[in-house]
Structures are given as C-alpha cells and as structure tokens.
Amino acid sequence: MYLLLAWRNIWRNRRRTLITLASVAFAVFFSSLMQSMQTAAWGNLIDNAVRFYTGYIQIHHQGYWDDRTLDNSFVNQASLQSKVAQHPGVVAVVPRLESFALASGTDRTKGTLVIGIDPEKEDNLTNLRNKMRAGTYLQAGQKKVLVAEGLADFLRLAPKDTLVLIGQGYHGANAAGKYEVAGIVKFPSTQLNDQVVYLPLPEAQWLYDTGDRLTSLSLLVDDPGKVEDVTATLQQELNATQFEVMNWQELMPELVQGFEIDRIGAQVILIILYAVISFGIFGTFLMMTTERRYEMGVMLAIGMSRLKLQSVMFLEILMLALGGTLLGILVSLPVILYMHNHPIPVSGNLAELYQNYGMEPVLPFSRKSDIFLRQAYTVAIITAVLGIYPLWFIQRLIPVTALRS
C-alpha cells in the first residue's frame, strides 16, 4: 500500500516530478560522459607510454634501478623467463641489456645509450619496426645496429655507414666494436632520439663481455588493471634478495603525478556539477514539502503516525532517485557506446603530436561498466541525503500550525 501511495503522490504534480528526474538524469549523464573520456584518454596514454619503452613491469637484479651499471646485471636463465612468461596475465617477456658507450661516425663523437634487444620480442612491446625511417629492421644474428634519427643526424650517418662504439664492459672490461648501420629509427622523445643505439642481444653481450647476462626483463600484461596484482605475485615468487620487480608507476613516477593532477582537476569539476544538481534537487524537495504542508497536517491530525508518513515520503524520494539514475544510465549508455566506436577525431598540431607518439589522433571513450555504476550510486546517494530534509520537516511539523497555513 505504501508503494502505491508513494507512486500516486509523485505523479500528482507531473511537472515537479519530471524536473527532478531530469536533474538526476542530467547529473548521471554528464558525469558518466566526463569520466568515460578521462578514463579512456589516460588508459590510452598509459598504454602508449609503457609500450614506448619501459613495459608495464620490469624485473632487474636487486639494486640495479638505483645504480644502473652492468655489474648489477643478472644471468639470463631460461627457467626464469619461462616461469615469468607462464604467469597468468603476462603476455610477453622482453629481455634487454643496456649500457653506455661513446659513438663515433665520420668526424664526430657522442655519448649514447646502447640497448641489446631481441628484435622480434622488442617489436611486440614497443612497435620498434613502425618507427623505422630509413634502411631495414634488425634481424637476429646480424652484426648491425639501429640508430636513432637525432643521433644519426649529429654523427652524419646513413644506412650502410659504419658506427664505432667504445665503452666499458662488465667488471671493467674494454668494450669496442664497429658496426654497419642497418636502419634509422625516430622517437618522439627528444632524449631517446638523440642518443639511442640498438644492437641484437647476442652482439651487445659480446661487446660488453657480459656472457649470457641481462639488465632487465620488460613485461607486457593483458589487463593494465591487474598490474599491481601481477607485480605483487612476482615479488613473492622471485628471490627478493636477488631480483626487484617494479611496475610502471614506480618506473615512471612523473606520469603518475600527471595522472593525479588531472584526476584532481576532474574531481573538482564533478564536485561543481554535483553541487549545481544538488541545489536543483533540493529545491524540488523544498517545493514538494511546502506544497503539501496542509495535506501532511491533515494526515497527522486524523491519526496517521509520523513514521508512516515519513515512510511514504521516503519511498517517493527513493523512486525519484532510482528513476532519475536509471534514466541517466539509459541516456548515457548509447551515447558512450557510440562515442567508443566512433571517437572524436583530433586535428591540427594536437593530431601531429598524437601521431608522433604513435597514438591515433582521436579522443576515445571508455565503456567500462564501473563508470556508469560509480556515477549512478554517487548521484543516488546525494539524492538520498538531500531526502533527509522532507523527513526532518515531517518530524517537526505541528498539525495545528500546518492547518492554519
């Protein structure tokens, strides 16, 4: 009976009810739209950032990240790579050997970052083959190098020219080698573009006299949301005194800071939106109680308990909150699904910047279910909290005063 009374009461004033439903639906729609765009944009940025070089997770010898020398490298155990590759959630394991050397072309020299890679595995993670600007990609077993475009321009090198590398190897051994330039690669990062040289992994190990040693294993996972769980599991499974396991948040703290700043800005906008909508909803509730002041006084005067009257009012508020929330989800869902399948294209300088970083020049939208649910229950809670006022009004209502009004 209470449900029937509440249902009839909310439709006695159709305009007021429709305004309330529209206010709640408006809040759910715009908050979901904004959260969908922010979640997808950052997810896309993070995926491109980790694929750009670091991977989602890296495994090093204990202490390597603080002191990145070949002396802190570790033996490339097939059992270790196999164990990590079989871990649920890990899609690819990419071995690397990194060090520094003095690179020389015809008449110039410059300090460089030399990275020994497995060409095919590296391409699976960083799409290195798509960054080629001239020449050919590395093949396993070749004694050739890939040179970053900025470094190649500085050393005046082109494909089939010769690059000389001189440095210090494992435990102070001499490192010197002469290699043909197989190709030129271009990075959007100026720092990498001006100093990176890629060698096939066996050749890099020979150059630096490391034997079968690596400085890191970079991991690609199937679900970015499981990175912390995979990291924690690997930390437990691997020898903590020998290996350190770090996820992308630890490897790229500046990206995490940027995400937090953007998230705080989005939260401020959401709070403003919720505040505006809250005033609208509260105004509707205020109008609803004022209009029915006399009616409530009559109900109390003829013997209806305050608890029953409050129960009917609470059901009315609950119906409005749930109805508006459901309406907001129904409106936002097809819009976000459409935007997910047809993202907004980006043009001009911003589009060029996206393409330089290997990203499609579009503004994507996420269709994760938790986006809708989070906004829905937030708005529903706000409506329920504001609904305390009508209940408080009934509790303090004096029937005689209400009847005189």
Image (cartoon, helix red, strand yellow):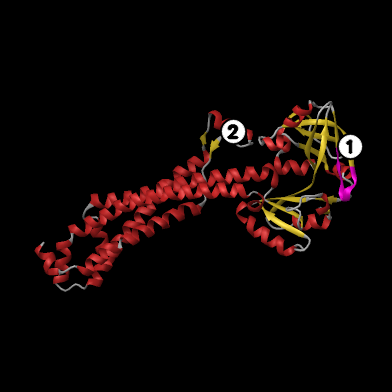
Q: Residue at x 27, y 62 (%)?
A: 389
Q: Which mark is residue 11?
A: none
Q: Amino acid under label 1? A: Gly
Residue 154 % position (x, y): 76, 28
Q: Amino acid under label 2? A: Leu
Answer yes or no: is residue 21 visible: yes
Q: Which residues are magenta?
A: 166-174
- Compared with 198, 274 (above or below) is below
Mark 1 closeness class: few <14, some 14–19, many ≥20 residues within 10 Å:
some
273 with respect to 113 (left or right): left
Residue 44 % position (x, y): 58, 43
* Residue ID for mark 1: 177
Residue 134 % position (x, y): 75, 27
Badge 2 marks a residue whose secondary structure is helix
Answer yes or no: is residue 333 visible: no
Q: Residue at x 23, y 65 (%)?
A: 393
Which quarter of the figure is the C terminus placed in? bottom left
